[in-house]
Amino acid sequence: MKAARLARRNVLHRPLETGLSVLLLAFGVGIISLMLLMQRSLTEDLDRNIKDIDLVLGAKGSPLQLILANVYHVDVPTGNISLAEARKVMRHPYISEAIPLAYGDNYELFRIVGTEPSYPAHYSAEVDDGRMFEAPFEVVVGQEVAAATGLALGDTFFSAHGLTDGTDVHRDKAYTVVGTFARTGSVIDQLILTPIASVWGVHEEVEGADEEITAVLLKKKNPLAILTLPNLLRDTPMQVALPAIEMNRLTQQFGIGIQTLRAVALLIMGLSFVSVFIALFASLRDRRYELALLRTMGATPRRLFSLVLYEGLWMTAAGIVAGLLLSRLGVMLLGQVLSDRFHYDVTQLAPVAGEIVLVAAALMVGAVAAGIPARSALRIDISNTLGQGR
Amino acid sequence: MLKTEGLHYRYEGSESELAFPDLRLEKGKELLLLGASGTGKTTLLHLVAGMRTPTAGSVELAGQAFSTLGTADRDRTRGRHMGIVFQTAHFVRSLTVGENLGLARSLAGCPDDEQVIAGLLEDLGLAHKLHAKVDALSVGEQQRVSIARAVAHGPGLILADEPTSALDDANTDAVLSLLRKQAERTGAALLIVTHDQRLKDRMTDHVELNLHP
């Protein structure tokens, strides 16, 4: 019988001790792996949505809120700005591209955003079915919206006022779906896009002084834009915010929580290794006769060493596998919650690079935790153990 | 099969040294080592089995030097050529009866053979215990299984430490004949160490150990 097989039988023979060690390790590994998976989803998601947007122009207020509302579409907007005022910035020589956004209402909590075709183009969103919106009250819906609401080409619907509930429905103007976007993996999937004029509630686009928009996504031509624009806007009700910097600040604030969680997870993992160590040590004390017996039956000391080492590695491996499965389960649950509440898809189950390091480190520490009891198996005195007196 | 010469052993921290008579045991023969407690019976058995290293003297097994081998080599040689029945039966508790016997065979380098194991258990009236956990055996069954394990790999020498001391006359006869039968089957030499005077009349050849000063 191979040492690895005997080790597995021995480990399974002590279900409680083994269970505790495996459970602790599963939770430690699970939490860390869950954090790695979420971190990947979030950073990928955040980066994908920032995509070359250097500045966001909007009403004064929290710059982070401005970014969250207009780049990620998760927070409420800071307020509206005058299109005429905004045009001054949009036509600034330091700016190469400007995409206006005007928040309208919602349909079944999916946001209706007034904009220009350059907005979906920025995220390389292509119309899958139908055509791009042209006239007011024509909309093109994102994949997620289409899937969740069942809106399809040719459908009409009424919007509900605001962004957060569907109680106050405008009955006067119906929107018509003229197309759906192919999946992009960006915010476009979650949005209903329409010409800005629909948001203003008029059928003809007219240039007027009281036309308002919510924000403008800007791409700079000259790096000086970042320095000059804030000065230019000092005495206006407008501001520009830098998505990269705001998101950096946000993740740093997340960071404290993440570090605490990571510390707790490492502590649990540490405990699990102590538990593997104690489980093996205690079981060796109970099994002194067994080990001595194995020697009399022809097992060399080195073989006993590998037997005990295998027992530790079995427990470690079971804990790691359980932990990785646990974190996948966690991602699926969290993904469900996040997609229900924020229409955000974070469900990516493929292994992260950090997990390879995690698994390797856990196996190594597990080997060390098992190695110390295993060494004591090397030194066992078979004659004294089996002799029962002289 | 077995030859010892001038075996001496001194326990750590002990003043006196134990000296043992020379033993000679041919293949297929049997020998009884008789001695009261304190005469170093078990010590001699452990010296013969290579579980202790003698302070002087030597053990030869099947014509080869045994007591001078390194620890690991002694373990391997013991596993291959000897089968030991200990005073108290010990098993690998996570394995079934059959697997314990299989383990003895595989550690001795014998191929897996369910037939041999099943046949052996059949012989000892334990055929129905093949898949039983060792913890579920009665004391008497445990002793029979430990005899089965000692012979499962067809060793040249069977060592038994006090196999009968806790048994009544009828069971003493039964265990002795069991050991003899198994030794006969494989042509092994049988060495029994005991203080049980009843065995003296039942066995042809014996060596008495005297109390050391």
Image (cartoon, helix red, strand yellow):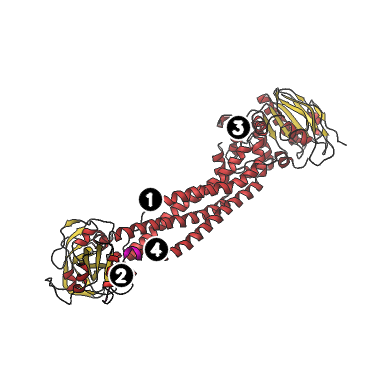
**In the image, A131: left or right of A315?**
left
Query: B59 or A96: which is nearer to us?
Result: A96
SS of the residue at dot 1? loop
SS of the residue at dot 2? helix
The CA span between labels 3 and 1 is 45 Å
Say which mark, if any, is on residue B159: none
The CA span between labels 3 and 2 is 76 Å
Write down the residue under mark 2: A66
Mark nearest the camera among 3 and 4 is 4
Magenta-span inclusion, residue A138: no
**In the image, A271: left or right of B19?**
left
The answer to which of marks 2 and 1 sits earlier in the sequence is 2
Chain where mark 4 sits: A
**In the image, A50: left or right of A366?**
left
Write down the residue under mark 3: B105
Q: Are marks 3 and 1 in contact (CB under 8 Å)?
A: no
Mark nearest the camera among 3 and 2 is 2
The CA span between labels 2 and 1 is 33 Å
Q: Position of residue A272 (x, y in %)?
A: 55, 54
Identity, as a three-letter code, of the amino acid under mark 3: Arg
Query: B127 or A317: which is nearer to us?
Result: A317
**In the image, A370: left or right of A58?**
right
Write down the residue under mark 1: A350
Q: Is residue B25 above or below residue A368?
A: above
Magenta segment range?
Answer: A234-246
Residue shown at 42%/66% (left/top)?
Answer: A253
Q: Are marks 4 and 1 in contact (CB under 8 Å)?
A: no
Q: Are marks 3 and 4 in contact (CB under 8 Å)?
A: no
Using a 10 Å C-alpha cutoff, classify the residue at mark 3 as few (fewer than 14 neighbours), some (14 to 19) or many (20 or more): many
The CA span between labels 2 and 4 is 16 Å
The CA span between labels 3 and 4 is 62 Å
